[in-house]
Image: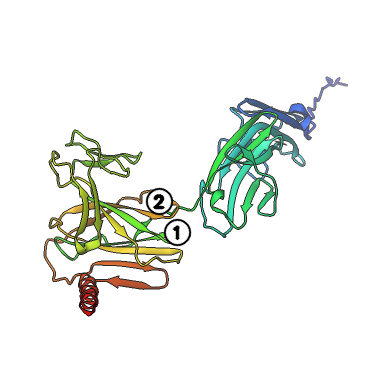
Amino acid sequence: MALLDPREITHHVEILVPPKITHVTSGGHLQVRKGSPVRLECSATGNPMPNITWTRKNNLLPNGEEQFTNPVYVIENMDRHKGGTYICTANNGVGQVATSQIILHVLYPPEISVENPIVYSGEGQEAMLVCIVHGESQPEVLWHKDTMQIDQTERHVIENRGARHTLIIRKVHPQDFGNYSCIADNQLGKTRKTVTLTGKPKTAVFRSVPNSQWKDKYNISWIVDSHSPIEEYKLYYRQVDGDTLQTHDGIFLDNRKTHTTYLGDNMLDYNRKISSYDSYAYNTGYHNLHHKWSKTDWRDIVLPAFPYSHHYTQGMSYLIRGLEPDQQYEARVQSRNRYGWSDFSESFLFTTSNTDTEIRDLGVTHYSSSRASVIFASEVRSLLAALLLAAVYRLVSF
């Protein structure tokens, strides 16, 4: 009988183990200061070895991605926008995935943004000044006018709703106009932002079409919002060519000139001053006789706003004469009420035609949101003649 050789059979058994997270940074709660780097770690066991993926609850990761696969996730230069809940997920294809989270809390000094840096209002009305304040720990917010702290009163109402901090001024008085500061303070620092409350007009907006139907005239019009009646306007215009430019800081330059023209009360540094009373050619003022005028110099016209309008939206239309055919011009305008001059409007470009069209004397139009009154030169001349005749008649009667 033959003997059988013994045989050995070896079985390799691999036990599959679902993932289990064993460690996360700081036990899941981490506080860091603004500007610091952060290293988030997540460790897991399982067979096969799980992959670790990072996501952010209800948000993208700071690098803009939806997820990142690695046991370690590094965030450089922390700020409040990078805080939140970070979730690490371990997955090896066996059983259910394992998850854990790290709540990342960012400590930072107050950060303030103002809803409107300039708030326009009028006497007897209500003004609302708003600051949006963020900070950790929660900042204390105070309001000041100049150097004086503002306390809650019947006319000064202070409201806080989350990050929104509001100062409401009821029945505005003239002395209420000025600069206000919202000051936020916490353990990491203090921040201040300024809001200006003013009764001046808002910046005017041009409403006329950019192309004139005449070669030497242009009817320009604009509107402006003001809580008080507009008393007068200043219209500035000049011809534009390839050498004329405007800088971003509001200073006008002409590359061909040795002088600089400024947006100021005199507009030109060679003391040109003109006060023109609408289109009836009533002019007072003086010119610098030593200055050689150029087509691209600024010309300014002062236009009284008559009759006064108590409507919020007011406006003016003016016929500019003596222009060059088929040329482009630049215009800006300022408005003044009892509280002062508005900021300059944005530049407005218009172009004259290369052909002429018959036109009657349009004069000046002053209008508001509810009515318009057109004053023509012929009507003014008739009115003056009537007044003169009445005066002569009265003298003869005596």
- At x 23%, y 76%, the residue is 386
What amino acid is found at the position of numbered circle 2 in the picture? Answer: Ser
In the image, residue 113 lies at what x, y percent?
56, 42
Kindly identify which numbered label has been placed on residue 163: none
Q: In which quadrant of the rendered image does the C terminus lie? A: bottom left
Above or below — where is 124 with respect to 66? below
| Residue under label 2 | 342
Q: Tell me the residue at 42%/72% (across/down).
A: 370
Do the numbered discs 2 and 1 sit on residues whose CB atoms are within 8 Å? Answer: yes
Seen from the viewer's position, the closer of residues 341 and 117 is 341
Image coordinates of residue 69 in percent, x first then y, are: 63, 33
Asked if residue 219 can be seen in this view, the reply is no
Disc assigned to residue 226: 1
Indicate the quadrant where residue 195 lies: top right
Is disc 1 placed on a helix, strand or loop?
loop
For this view, does 388 lie left or right of residue 76?
A: left
- Furthest residue toward front: 398
Looking at this view, is 101 or 270 the one in front?
270
Q: Is residue 239 left or right of residue 192?
A: left
Instruction: Name above or below for residue 228 compared with residue 1.
Output: below
Is residue 6 placed above or below 185 in the rendered structure? above
Amino acid under label 1? Answer: Ser
Q: Residue 233: percent from the left, percent from the top?
A: 33, 56
The residue drawn where x is 68% and y is 50% is: 159
Query: Along the polypeptide, which appears first: circle 2 or circle 1?
Result: 1
Q: Quadrant of the N terminus?
A: top right
Q: Position of residue 4 (x, y in %)?
A: 84, 21
Residue at point 68%, 43% (across, down): 57
Q: Rate crowding at label 2 as few (under 14), some (14 to 19) or many (20 or more) other CA atoms within 10 Å.
A: many
How many C-alpha atoms fall within 10 Å of the one at disc 1: few (<14), some, or many (≥20)? many
